[in-house]
Image (spheres, grey):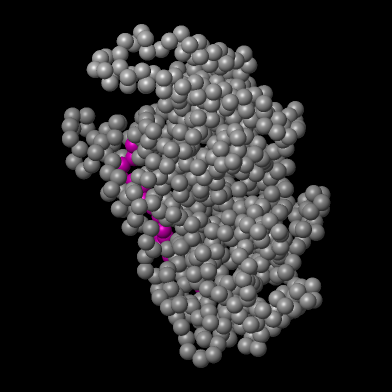
Amino acid sequence: MPLTRSLSMSSLPGLEDWEDEFDLQNTVLFEVAWEVANKVGGIYTVLQTKAKVTGDEWGDNYYLIGPYTEQGVRTQVELLEPPIPELKRTLDSMNSKGCKFLAQSEEKPHVVTHFHEWLAGIGLCLCRARRLPVATIFTTHATLLGRYLCAGAVDFYNNLENFNVDKEAGERQIYHRYCMERAAAHCAHVFTTVSQITAIEAQHLLKRKPDIVTPNGLNIKKFSAMHEFQNLHAQSKARIQEFVRGHFYGHLDFNLDKTLYFFIAGRYEFSNKGADVFLEALARLNYLLRVNGSEQTVVAFFIMPARTNNFNVETLKGQAVRKQLWDTANAVKEKFGRKLYESLLVGSLPDMNKMLDKEDFTMMKRAIFATQRQSFPPVCTHNMLDDSSDPILTTIRRIGLFNSSADRVKVIFHPEFLSSTSPLLPVDYEEFVRGCHLGVFPSYYEPWGYTPAECTVMGIPSISTNLSGFGCFMEEHIADPSAYGIYILDRRFRSLDDSCSQLTSFLYSFCQQSRRQRIIQRNRTERLSDLLDWKYLGRYYMSARHMALAKAFPDHFTYEPHKADAAQGYRYPRPASVPPSPSLSRHSSPHQSEDEEEPRDGPLVEDGERYDEEAEAAKDRRNIRAPEWPRRASCASSTGGSRRSNSVDTGPSSSISTPSEPLSPASSLGEERN
């Protein structure tokens, strides 16, 4: 499998802001996907979050085309009249003739059509077969055959060049869909993928090297208060703690102030999403915490939808018991407060022996008796339809994580997407992520990975892999990802057992962090959110559209690819101060001498490292700004003959960042606010 990067885009500063607006007066953009206003997976998030920046660029000349669903129309679409006559005539013609053709306008605008995934690819193939005058772009977010092969437990990435793709697709009954995907990739003027790892995959399976990598972004909402996200973390964590109190009633023999919440979420693809590796690492972590006498407890959530018939009765009972205890405590508190108030009114100190009567003690004893429980707290919150064969539950039975009192790692499998209206865990996904301490996504097949990206913009550290698009992207643009709360697990050059051991080291090291260290790391993680903002990553899509226009309409648009120096690039430097893990023997930045009493350039963290939040934040803000680059592309107006210069730089052609040695599992993290 080749390690060299030969795509035209690889580094963020390779694309600068254009000084002149692109002439879009007679140019129209159509974006076609099955997930337009139709939430199925990650492509929906791509289109929804990218719509604003694309709309700002194209205005009324930007249109999204997707399947018509009543639910989507009611909840996500605002019905409007077509803003231009040409489009109205087209839609009228489609309605009257069953969508058999498109009407043409008199001025013949330059049309760019962007198709996502093989489901929309048939439209691209027909555009080229019928020689329609449109510029076409095809983006594959994950190759169809790649997903099937990885689900079959094959050594995928080390054998990419050896697969007989036609044979493999035929054996998996997906040959017709594979052919559509491959045809769309070859017919498009511009072919793109969402990550470098998927680009290599597409080159071998679809037999075309992508022209541009277009990483997935998010809409970043910044808060006015610098540490507002820390406060949101504390608030959301309190909601999760309430659920934990109810779920573990009768066995709440661990300190919630010393409890960490880890989670994995996404489609229920047991091996592809790395749930198998996570469970094995949790079993090893449980052993390490027990033999070392750690006071830390870990509650690991698995948020993966599976087939269920209802909530588990024991789980619902736990929340009912918790609520009853709360009501009992409030009733006693009100009676106590009323007696205290009356005593103070008459100017005397209360007699504590008379503040609570026999009835109060009886009420509290009954409440305590209701918390008695003989069985362990349930692992699964729902009744599973395939309980005996479910991969997660089967593995839990094998490794023996049954939420016993002796276990320092507790497991909760929630086989349903989170909702604020749930009677069990009434939080939405974003609030849940904010309340956790660490997202764990040790995926084997993950073309991009929105879950760790969402963790990053919320200031929550995460673990991803060097086989995920997000992990490779962060590894390329950050000199020391772990210092910023981005752990990269090696699943490419290690055996499965070695990867489990490395993940265990990451988790155990995280458990050793102090609260102060976790706060520092979350500050750094949140600062990376600008790196994932569509206002920066949207430039890759802009460049793809310009390239497509130049290929389809060479008389009116020009695009000059530029191969930059490999030394040029965008890269977050290593933080000046890195609070080390307690298990780290070496210092990760110059060590202060033991007899030095006062820091010279910033406050000290517990282990003697200097840390200046304001200075580091200011330095990172400077890094996010792209340097100046010479303009490399231009377009000619189709009406006037004058040229408008629009600078586009395709960035350096560097290699995939792969560590020559394992990342230190004890690299510093940071911590949270209660």
542 horizontally vs 530: left or right: right
Most prominent secondary structure in the magenta stretch? loop
- The boundaries of the magenta stretch are 561-580
Could you say where residue 579 lies in the image, as x and y percent from the top left? Answer: 34, 36
Q: Position of residue 438 (x, y in %)?
A: 48, 37
Report if residue 154 is visible in the image. Answer: no
Residue 506 as seen in the image, left or right of residue 597 = right
Q: Nearer the viewer, residue 91 or 49?
A: 91
Instruction: Specify the farthest residue to the front.
Output: 346
Q: Is residue 186 magenta?
A: no
Q: Please, is residue 69 above or below residue 597 in the view? A: below
Residue 169 on image: x %, y %: 78, 53
Q: Nearer the viewer, residue 366 or 27?
A: 366
Q: Which quadrant: the C terminus?
A: top left
Asked if residue 293 is positioned above or below residue 438 in the image, the reply reads above
Name the residue: 69% across, 45% down. 150
128 with respect to 584 (left or right): right
Residue 412 visible in the picture: yes
Residue at position x 42%, y 42% in the image: 232
In the image, residue 253 lies at what x, y percent?
Answer: 49, 17
